[in-house]
Image (spheres, rainbow, N blue to C red):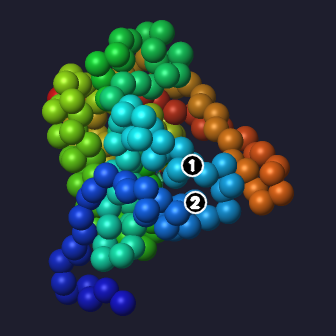
Amino acid sequence: MDDPEKPFEFVVKPADAVQIDCVHRIFSPGDYSRPQHRRYEVQSNGEGVYLIAWHLETPVGGFLVRWSGPQDEAVSARIDVANSAFLEGGLTIDEYRRKGVATAIIGEAERLAKEHGCTRIGLEVGSSDNPDAKRLYEKLGYVDWGHGDFTIRWGSMDAEGNTRMDAEVVTYMDKPL
Ligand SMILES: CC(C)(COP(=O)(O)OP(=O)(O)OC[C@H]1O[C@@H](n2cnc3c(N)ncnc32)[C@H](O)[C@@H]1OP(=O)(O)O)[C@@H](O)C(=O)NCCC(=O)NCCS
């Protein structure tokens, strides 16, 4: 049990192949489409870095930063995202929220993206159903792009191989680096 009096200590590091099964068990148990492994593949392919925050041996949060994106046409048709990094898959597990984990990961993502030559960084966030995340991003300097909402869709898979599609109405936010 963590001592509430002690400052919460964690480190943010790029994902490592040997840790990704553990990250999967904690972040997306029961999703047989293996989203954590797919994020790690983005890093292996040199298209970005999957940053994981670790508290001792426990992965407590993560964000994938891509060196360009998003690929959603709703965004790429309106603005040039070629030199803009893109944050996705952001998560801090419940019991470790409001301790600065996401703030630290995003800070490291911004540092790496700038080092990589990106001039901006963006993300998509639920426009009305995720006010907490949106407020955090605003606090970190991200600004709504002003071109309205659009819908994103993604799939997950259960143990029997049944695919389930989810959708969310999001807006795009970004900031200069
Ligand atoms: C959105 C999310 C990633 C934020 O993660 P988090 O690690 O709790 O974020 P932080 O701790 O950095 O910041 C959250 C809040 O805690 C505050 N905070 C930061 N460090 C703190 C500390 N040491 N003590 C108290 N509060 C702190 C932040 O200022 C922020 O305040 P706000 O709510 O007024 O904006 C997390 O809530 C989450 O996983 N949500 C579900 C999935 C999701 O929505 N992902 C994002 C998709 S776009």
Instruction: Depth check: give the residue in front, 141 or 158.
Output: 158
Q: Is mark 2 within 8 Å of ligand 1?
A: no
Residue 35 shows which numbered tag? 1
Q: Position of residue 2 (x, y in %)?
A: 31, 86
The correct choice, above or below, for 14 with respect to 26 in the image is above
The answer to whether residue 36 shows anywhere in this view is yes
Answer with the quadrant where ligand 1 appears in the image. bottom left
Q: Position of residue 150 (x, y in %)?
A: 56, 25
Q: Quadrant of the C terminus?
A: top left
Q: Find numbered disc 2 in the image and state the secondary structure of the residue it sits on.
A: loop
The answer to whether 123 appears left or right of 38 in the picture is left
x 39%, y 41%: residue: 43
In the image, what residue type sits under mark 2? Ser
Marks 2/1: CA–CA distance:
7 Å
In the image, what residue type sits under mark 1? Pro
x 52%, y 52%: residue: 36
Instruction: Depth check: give the residue in front, 147 or 16.
Output: 16
The answer to whether 156 appears left or right of 84 in the picture is right
Q: Position of residue 50 (x, y in %)?
A: 38, 47
x 45%, y 25%: residue: 70
Asked if labels 1 and 2 touch by Cβ distance under 8 angstroms, the answer is: yes
Q: Position of residue 79 (x, y in %)?
A: 38, 12
For label 2, the residue is 28
